[in-house]
């Protein structure tokens, strides 16, 4: 009579699998894509590997290197799948050769343990460059990498582009089809002299890394405002990119921007998990080490010759915020001027929104409200909750409480992150309590 795993073992293995998927699922996928050379095949292989883990880990125990185990099982599952499809015999031989090359020979799974961590770092950055092939549109490059390489949900990717999930899903399908039909090679610009040049891909790579950080800095949905691991992963990738491409203004600017924002992490959320606005933050909680490094990188980025980087300008804005020891010390006129520079370089709705907020601090809420109303009238960001929240704040400052209440309610309708929803609900409650009876 066979005895199955006890409930504790099953629960323990289940928790381990969930933790591995959360921490390293995207990294496992990146390595499988490198080994297999096919997005869809790699995604299926990863799914089968995690299914195998659900069956085997409760019985055999969690392996010493879970990620290496998953990669080994996933690759083998993919090879078995291709073998079953007799039309792809040649591809099987290529895969086995590539696997031997990648692993230094045919070895058991546990022999990967010594090399797997280094492989992850290379694979994720390497695959980001591959996804940012110039044959794909910039939007497709970023969307594909965020979803397939960095593990963001379709909802999070849609949020980054301010479009619907259906639009992003269609964009992802088209991008994968383009890679497959056009025979785009799984090579980086460093691996082939005949391939597309590095400069054609760097814009997409930078956008991807910053989008990962943005999702970590303010998550799309859920109960926590900040995903520390995503922020740390984006900064790690930024450091790798800086090592790969030293003294590049855009790379330095991006790394500075992420560090200066991340430096305020401890002050952005209360002990209860509630959102704290920049103006209300305890500035003694800001990380002085990250601030010092970020400020030095900003100076380096701005001192280098070449085209002005949008990331360097954004980092310069962040630098002005962290240099202010009190909120009253904030140099809003200079911040407004930098946003005007940024608008010329990157005229997006988000930049327009942030520029209007800066204008409100210099020229007053009335002029800023005119700018936001113009942005709203164009209908590009109707479902962006921060636009409505900003309008509510301006209307509140102007004493137009009923209109402010409507704006905050619209913001609450579109907000999906719990700390932001609690913040907006509190603003609404305050305004409702202050209304005269019968009003």
Image: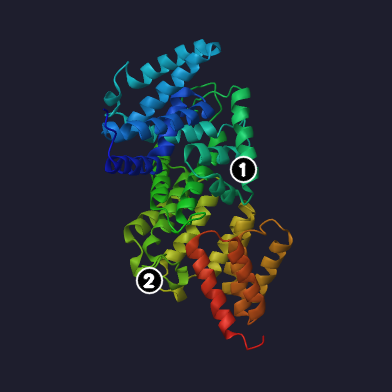
**Mark 2 surroundings: few (<14), some (14-19) or many (≥20) residues within 10 A:** some
Q: What element carries label 1?
A: helix
Q: Which residue lies furthest to the front in this view?
A: 1
Residue at numbered disc 2: 282
Q: Is residue 95 above or below residue 178?
A: above
Please identify the quarter of the rendering in which residue 143 is found: top right
In front: label 1 or label 2: 1
Quarter of the image with the C terminus is bottom right
In this rendering, would 416 be left or right of 266?
right
Q: Position of residue 425 (x, y in %)?
A: 54, 71
Residue located 38% across and 26% down the image: 73
Query: 171 or 244, which lies in front?
Result: 171
The picture places residue 386, in percent across and down from the top left corner, at 58, 63
Counting from the top left corner in percent of width and height, residue 336 is at 57, 66
Q: In this view, does 399 lie above or below 92?
A: below
Seen at 58% across and 61% down, the residue is 339
User: Foreground residue, 196 or 141?
Assistant: 141
- 144 in relation to 275, above or below: above
Q: Name the residue under label 1.
A: 168
Answer yes or no: is residue 88 visible: yes
């Amino acid at each position: 009579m066979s005895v199955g795993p006890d409930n504790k073992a099953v629960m323990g293995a289940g928790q381990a699998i969930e933790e591995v998927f959360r921490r390293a699922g995207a990294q496992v996928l990146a390595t499988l894509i490198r080994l297999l050379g096919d997005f869809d095949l790699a995604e299926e292989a990863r799914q089968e590997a995690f299914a195998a883990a659900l069956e085997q880990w409760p019985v055999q125990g969690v392996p010493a290197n879970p990620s290496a185990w998953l990669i080994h099982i996933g690759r083998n599952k993919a090879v078995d799948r291709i073998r079953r499809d007799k039309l792809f015999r040649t591809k099987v031989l290529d895969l086995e050769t590539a696997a031997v090359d990648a692993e230094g020979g045919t070895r058991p799974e546990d022999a990967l343990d010594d090399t797997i961590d280094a492989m992850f770092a290379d694979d994720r950055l390497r695959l980001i460059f591959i996804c940012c092939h110039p044959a794909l549109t910039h939007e497709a490059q970023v969307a594909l990498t965020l979803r397939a390489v960095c593990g963001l949900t379709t909802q999070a990717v849609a949020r980054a582009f301010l479009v619907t999930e259906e639009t992003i899903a269609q964009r992802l399908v088209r991008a994968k089809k383009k890679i497959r039909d056009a025979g785009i090679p799984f090579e980086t610009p460093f691996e082939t002299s005949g391939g597309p040049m590095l400069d054609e891909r760097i814009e997409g790579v930078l956008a991807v890394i910053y989008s990962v950080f943005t999702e970590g800095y303010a998550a799309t949905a859920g109960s926590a405002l900040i995903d520390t691991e995503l922020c740390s992963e984006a900064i790690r990738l930024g450091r790798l990119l800086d090592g790969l491409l030293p003294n590049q203004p855009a790379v330095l600017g991006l790394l500075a921007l992420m560090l200066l924002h991340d430096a305020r992490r401890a002050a952005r959320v209360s002990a209860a998990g509630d959102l704290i606005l920049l103006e209300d933050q305890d500035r003694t909680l800001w990380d002085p080490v990250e601030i010092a490094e970020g400020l030095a990188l900003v100076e380096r980025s701005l001192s280098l010759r070449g085209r002005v980087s949008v990331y360097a300008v954004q980092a310069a804005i962040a630098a002005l915020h962290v240099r202010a020891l009190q909120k009253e010390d904030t140099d809003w006129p200079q911040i407004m001027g930098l946003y005007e520079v940024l608008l010329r370089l990157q005229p997006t709705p988000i930049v327009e929104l942030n520029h209007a907020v800066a204008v409100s601090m210099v020229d007053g809420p009335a002029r800023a409200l005119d700018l936001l109303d113009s942005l709203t009238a164009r209908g590009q960001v109707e479902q962006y909750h921060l636009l409505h929240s900003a309008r509510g704040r301006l209307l509140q400052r102007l004493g137009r409480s009923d209109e402010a209440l409507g704006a905050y309610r619209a913001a609450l309708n579109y907000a999906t992150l719990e700390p932001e929803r609690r913040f907006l609900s509190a603003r609404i409650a305050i305004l409702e309590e202050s209304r005269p009876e019968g009003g």
